Image: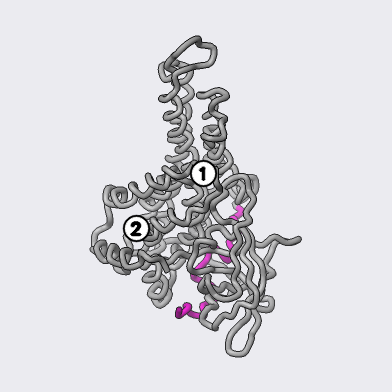
């Protein structure tokens, strides 16, 4: 647990009122931290320095609890407010916004959970600073799960290896998918249990500091109450898949906004231009102005799409809470998120390439690391290949085919076994 846990708890109590937080209150709380994170982004990129300190700043400010209701000591932000803040964090460093994806995904499913004991267990821990990481995917010859739990006396033994464990290296708790025989099972346990090894061996050319590498489980001793759920193969529709997608799209849009900011700062400092003798002021060059105008427009479009989907998810959640949601509503949320994916990726990849038109060869200097915006956006975009979702969109409109639901989209239907007690 973080050293700043008491600070977070006190902050949560201060926010425990009936009214919703305002945008101004949330921004005043977090923008100074985002600015500090942004200040070290280039250095971290150059040195491949994991942002442990920066994650600690966010813990201490209660960012991990921003979606938790005020009645539990959280900040109670709406989905549009949350994604607005996440976009600002992604602009500061999209590595940091991305590494929190599993944390916020897990908490969003707890928000929609029917079991009050589950919320009562997890929310206070997160308000006190705990972070949650996912260890779901594996590198193997086939897509699936090979990690296993087997009964060992009064408990269980967990063995296996996960990859793409984004954020787990920073986490206090790990949520992993395993097999109990042939039954797909979700387990949650403290990250420091004996036998857990977290490696920083992610070798992607972008999002280098997300910790998206290997997590190894070697005879990890689990209790019965570390088993969170067993999946029975029947999954109810929800907005969870769209939520997961939007976290990625927000990180991508943040890279686009950062590219715009870096382009503006780069041009404003320049005193020479291509094919112009002597000292000059590129900021007054109509061609340079046009490039920056295009960059601003691409970023604005990406930001607007993210905000639109966030508002769709908020409306979907509210109807779900009110009991007026149906399958068609959740399907529409998925389709909107998939459509956004097709466009936001293209907008930001355009922007992060167009950025170099304002600077000539000097913009490619390794010391500036301006290429990180394209690399980060391209890497985040590759997590869920857009072509698969594009086909689903077409199949939906042409044939009415509903996108499949799965175990990570339906928190209410699995058979619950309880919540961990430590």
* SS at badge 2: helix
Q: Is residue 266 above or below residue 390?
A: above
> Would you say residue 334 sits in the magenta stretch?
no
Residue of label 2: 61
Answer left or right for 220 relative to 98.
right
Q: CA distance from mark 2 to mark 1?
A: 24 Å
Residue at the (52%, 24%) spot, across then down:
359
Q: Nearer the viewer, mark 2 or mark 1?
A: 2
What's the residue at 63%, 56% (across, down)? Answer: 201
Q: Which residues, given as a range, are shown in magenta?
A: 401-422
Judged from this view, the residue extending furthest toward the bottom is 153
Screen quadrant of the N terminus: bottom left
Give the x, y percent position of residue 369: 54, 37
Closest to the observer: 71 or 166?
166
Task: Using a 10 Å C-alpha cutoff, classify the residue at mark 1 as few (fewer than 14 neighbours), some (14 to 19) or many (20 or more).
Answer: many
Q: Is residue 335 visible?
A: no
Q: Is residue 275 above or below residue 197?
A: above
Looking at the picture, tell me which residue is in the foreground, 239 or 252: 252
In the picture, the quarter occupied by the C terminus is bottom left
Name the residue beneath numbered marker 1: 252
Q: Secondary structure at mark 1?
A: helix
In the rendered image, residue 105, in percent from the top left (x then y), is placed at 48, 60
Q: Name the image quarter holding residue 216.
A: bottom right
From the viewer's perspective, is 411 left or right of 213? left
């Amino acid at each position: 647990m973080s050293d700043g846990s008491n600070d977070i708890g006190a902050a949560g109590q201060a926010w425990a009122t009936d009214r919703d937080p305002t945008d101004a209150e949330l921004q005043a709380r977090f923008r100074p931290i985002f600015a500090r994170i942004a200040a070290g982004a280039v250095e971290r990129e150059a040195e491949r320095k994991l942002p442990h300190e920066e994650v600690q700043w966010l813990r201490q400010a209660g960012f991990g609890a921003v979606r938790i209701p005020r009645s539990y000591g959280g900040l109670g932000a709406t989905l549009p407010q949350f994604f607005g803040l996440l976009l600002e964090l992604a602009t500061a460093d999209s590595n940091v916004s991305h590494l929190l994806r599993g944390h916020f995904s897990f908490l969003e499913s707890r928000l929609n959970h029917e079991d009050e004991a589950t919320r009562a267990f997890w929310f206070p821990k997160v308000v006190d600073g705990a972070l949650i990481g996912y260890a779901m995917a594996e590198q193997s010859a086939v897509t699936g799960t090979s990690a296993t739990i087997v009964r060992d006396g009064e408990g269980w033994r967990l063995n296996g290896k996960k990859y793409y464990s984004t954020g787990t290296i920073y986490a206090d708790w790990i949520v992993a998918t395993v097999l109990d025989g042939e039954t797909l099972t979700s387990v949650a346990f403290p990250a420091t249990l004996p036998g857990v090894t977290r490696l920083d061996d992610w070798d992607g050319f972008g999002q280098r500091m997300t910790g998206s590498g290997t997590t190894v489980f070697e005879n990890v001793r689990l209790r019965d109450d570390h088993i969170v759920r067993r999946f029975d193969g029947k999954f109810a529709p929800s907005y969870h898949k769209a939520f997961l997608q939007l976290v990625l799209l927000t990180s991508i849009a943040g890279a686009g906004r950062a590219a715009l900011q870096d382009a503006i700062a780069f041009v404003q400092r320049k005193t020479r231009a291509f094919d112009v003798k002597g000292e000059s002021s590129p900021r007054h060059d109509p061609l340079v102005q046009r490039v920056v105008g295009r960059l601003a427009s691409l970023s604005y479009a990406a930001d607007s799409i993210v905000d639109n989907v966030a508002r769709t998810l908020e409306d979907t959640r509210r109807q779900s809470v009110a009991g007026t949601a149906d399958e068609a509503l959740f399907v529409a949320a998925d389709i909107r998120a998939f459509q956004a994916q097709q466009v936001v990726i293209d907008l930001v990849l355009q922007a992060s390439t167009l950025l170099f038109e304002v600077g000539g060869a000097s913009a490619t200097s390794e010391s500036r690391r301006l290429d990180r915006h394209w690399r980060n956006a391209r890497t985040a975009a590759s997590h869920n290949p857009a072509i698969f979702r594009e086909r689903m969109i077409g199949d939906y409109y042409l044939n009415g085919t509903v996108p499949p639901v799965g175990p990570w989209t339906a928190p209410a239907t699995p058979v619950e076994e309880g919540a961990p007690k430590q």
